[in-house]
Image (spheres, rainbow, N blue to C red):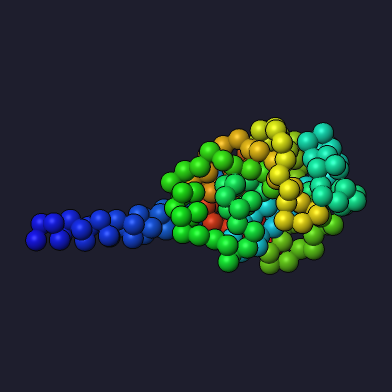
Amino acid sequence: MIRYRAFRWLLALPLIAIALWATAAAVGGWWPVNRDWRQAGTGIRIYVIDNGIHTGIVLPADGWGDIVRPRDFADPRYAWHRWRSFGWGDRAFYVETPTWRDLRPMTVIRAALGSERTVMHVDALAEPVPGPDVRSVILRPEEFARLSAFIRASFAGGATTAGYGPDDVFYPAHGRYSAIRTCNSWTGEALRHAGVRTAAWTPTSASVMRWLPQ
C-alpha cells in the first residue's frame, strides 16, 4: 500500500508542477511594472509580434549591420528589408523543431528543466501592420537605446545557423532557457529594461501582449 501511494504521488508530481507554474504565470502576468509609463507622442516606432506561442521584438534595421550581416541570410536580398525581428529561445525549439508537428515531448521536458543551448532568431521583414497580434509602440530615444542594448547583449557571437527560409537566421545567444525563463520571458525582460509598462513575469505570449497599446 505504501509503495502504491508513493507511485501515485510520483505520477501526480508533474501535474502539480504544471498547476503551480500556471498559477504563478497567471499572477506574474497580471502584476505590472513600470506602471507610470506611457508611450511617447513622437519618437522611434517598434513592434511586438505574437504568433500565438512566441513573441518577437521588431526594430528598424538601421544600426544592426555589424551583428546581423546581409551575408548571414540564405538570400542576402532580404537584407534590404528595413525591419528586423528579434526573438530568443531554446535551440531545440527553434532550430530542431521547424513545425509543431516536429515537436517531441522530450524536447519540451529538456527545455523546461533548463537548457544552455539558446539562440537569437532574427527575421528580415517589411514593416509590420498593426493588429491583434502586432502591437506598435513608440519609444523615447533613451528607451530605444536601452532596448537595443539589451538585445545586443543577448548575442553571444559565433557561427550562424540557417533559418527556416531565405529571410531568417539563428545566432548563438547568452542565457539559460527554462520553464522560468522562456522566450516570452525574454521579451518581457527586454521591455522592462527599456522602461515599458509590462508584467513582472511574462512566460506566455498573452502575458506580453496584454500590456501593450492596441
Q: Position of residue 128 (x, y in %)?
A: 80, 59
- Is 53 drawn above or below residue 42 in the view shown? below
Q: How many labels sit on residues?
A: 0
For the view shown, which residue lies furthest in the left direction?
1
Can residue 199 be seen here? The reply is no
Q: Nearer the viewer, residue 36 or 102?
A: 102
Residue 37: percent from left, percent from top: 65, 46
Residue 36 at what x, y percent from top left? 61, 46
Q: Quadrant of the N terminus?
A: bottom left
Left or right of 166? Residue 54 is: left
Please state, as top left, top right, bottom left or bottom right, where the C terminus lies in the image.
bottom right
Residue 12 position, x and y percent, is 27, 60
- 88 or 164: nearer the viewer: 164
Q: In the displayed structure, does residue 166 sit left or right of residue 149?
A: right
Up the image or down, 140 lies above or below 135; here it is above
Residue drawn at the location 68% of the way across and 52% of the way down? 56
Residue drawn at 66 percent across, 38 percent down? 172
Residue at image x 72%, y 40%?
A: 160
* Residue 14 image-quadrant placement: bottom left
Q: Is residue 100 visible?
A: yes
Looking at the picture, does residue 131 appear above or below residue 213? below
Please give the name of the residue rendered at 56% of the width and 37% of the height, measured from the top-left corner: 175
